[in-house]
Every structure is written in structure tokens, then in C-alpha cells.
Amino acid sequence: MALRKNLKSNASSKLVITSAAFQDHIMRSLLHPDFSLSDPLRRRSRGKHPQVREGVEERDLQRRHEQEEREYVLGPAPPPLTLAQKLGLVASPRERLTEDEWTRVKGRSIQQEESAQPCAICREEFRLQPQVLLSCSHVFHRACLQAFERFSGRKRCPLCRREPYETRVINDAARLFRHRCATRIQAYWRGYKARKWYRTIKKSICPKDKRLRRQFFESRLQELNDSFVRYCHTDTEAFLSDIDRSLSSSRRVFQQLERKSVSEPQENDWDRIKSQVIQRGVWDCPICLTALSNLSLPTVSERSNHQQRRPTVLLSCSHLFHQLCLEAFEAFSADSRPLCPLCRSAYHKKLI
């Protein structure tokens, strides 16, 4: 009988302890809900405005920057174990990840380039918006994850469906965005400096191409003429006409200098030129279209009519003309040194 009473008392006491343990566990669960995304570093009291203190603004900005760059785990520290958890009646919560484990999780996230990709919930880039890293190595906007938890009513990863998870504030996406912005600003600035430098060089250095060189000198000369017109108190029309005449004369001088100078042929060269004329076999003057004398040895009849033949001139370009025709052409030409009527090249002539 005494043994039965002891067993009944032990069972009743055990039942009382179990019920008390469950009651304590339920009460603590209701009093300490899980605020997974609450930020202890960003709690602000309502109705209080920050006071501006002189001399400490820089330190406040530096402290704020350090807080923005700091990485920390969201959510308060886990509450102590309840009696039911200690007795094994309720499963104990999982231990929080250590710094080494968070380092490995972040390494997997960097390897998968989670911060470089848009948020999987809103499909927008992170930029400077707060982002959180889950213990499953996935990254989301903090506001997007809060809305997802509020909508689903449970802590489950939107991608891998892992439940539950821990969250940690990181700044990898903001750092990448600042780097991209700095790179773009530097590229624009360097492009502006390069274009400005090129415009300066283009105005001061003469190009190597002939056409561009002529345009360069013409533009410089035009600038000088414009400056003369602005600062000289004289008749504008007469001044411009003088400039036009000087330009035309300068252009003629430049054209003469650009022409290739032709050296006077020697006797061997004249023999070679004669052979070219004989090989060509054209014995008409290109100017008057009448017959020329043959360069071969003259016959008896040709010797008798030598006085009646018109003198023929051989040019260094291997063309034949009547002497009178060529002299008339040279007198008609406006150039200081006339060119060949056929090939338009400078020449030396020889009477044959």
C-alpha cells in the first residue's frame, strides 16, 4: 500500500511538473515572439529629434558610416531555455551560427554572385538599399524579405524553402554599386579630358595628310584674316580684295612648289626617248594634225625637200610636235612653265 501511494504521488508530482513546464513554455513563447528582422542598431524613439552639436558632425558622420559598413546578425539574442526544453519535452532551438560559419556562408554567396544579381523577390538591383544574407547563402532586399515573411506567416527561404533561417545584414551590393558608379564617373571624366586635349592638339599641330594639312593652314589663315578685319580700321572691301589676291598668288606658288622638278635628259636619255617614239609609230602633230618628219634616216627625196619640211620638236615625255605649234601653245598657256599638251607633265624639248 505504501509503495502504491509513493508511485501515485510520484506520478502526480511528475504530471504537475510537466504541466507547469508546458505552461511556462507557452507563456514565454507568447511573451517573446521571434522578431527575426528587427534591427537593434536602428531603433529610434518617436518624438525625439537628433540634436545638432557643433564640432562633432564629422565624428557623427564617421560613426554613421562605420555603422552602415558594419555587418551584424539581425534579431535579439535567443532567450534562455524553458523548463520544458530542459526536460526534453520540447525541442530546443538551434544554436546560432558562429562567425566562422557566417564566413563560409558569405563565401558561398560571393561564389554564386548573389549580390551582383537582382533581388529574387522584386527583381530589382540592390544598389544602396539594405540587403540581408540568409543562412542558406541567399541574398534579398531587407524590405522584400520582411514583406514575404509578413505575407507567408513563417520563416521560409523564398528560393530553397529552408526553414527556419538566420539573417545577417551585409553591404556587398552597395560596395559593388559604389565601385560601378566610381568607374563610370572616371570613364566620363577621362573621355571629357581626352576630347578636350584632342581639340587643343588639333588646333596647334599640323596633320600629315596633304588634304588635312591644306585645310589646317586655310583655317589658320582664315582666323588671321578675321582678326585683321576686326582690329584694322580700313576699307573692308579693299582689304578683302588684297587678301584674295595674296591668297591666289600664294596658291600659285604652292602649286609650283608641289610639282615635281624634271631634270634635263642626257644624250643616252634622248636616244632612249627616240626609240620610244619610233616604236610608237605616230607621225602626226597632235596640235595641227599634220604629218611630222620621220626620226629614221632620211631618203634622197627627203634630202631634197629638207628645206620645205617644218622643224620638229621632241619632248622629254616622248611626244613629237611642230616647233611652231608648240611655241604657239606655250604662248597661249597661262602657267609660268607650260605642260605637255598630251600627258600634262613638265618637259624638256629638243629640236630634231
Image (tube, grey):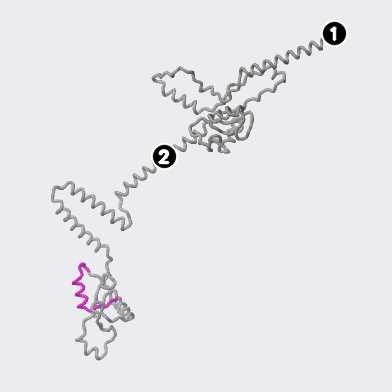
Residue 168 quadrant? top right
Residue 54 quadrant? top left
Quadrant in which the N terminus is drawn? top right
324 in the magenta segment? yes
Q: Left or right of 247: which side holds 143?
A: right
Residues in magenta, as a range: 318-337
Q: Amino acid at mark 1?
A: Ala
Q: Is residue 39 above or below residue 221?
A: above
Question: Helix, strand or loop at disc 2?
Answer: helix
Tell me the residue that label 1 is attached to.
2
Residue 260 lies, in percent from the top left, at 28, 66
Task: Report the residue that reaches farthest toward the front.
Answer: 151
Which numbered marker is on residue 186?
A: 2
Q: Is residue 124 above or below residue 153?
A: below
Q: Amino acid at mark 2?
A: Gln
Nearer-the-camera pick, 200 or 1: 1
Mark 2 is surrounded, within 10 Å at the Cα level, by few (under 14), some (14 to 19) or many (20 or more) other residues, namely few
Question: Helix, strand or loop at disc 1?
Answer: helix
Quadrant in which the C terminus is drawn? bottom left
Residue 301 lies, in percent from the top left, at 24, 91
- The residue located at (23%, 70%) in the rendering is 338
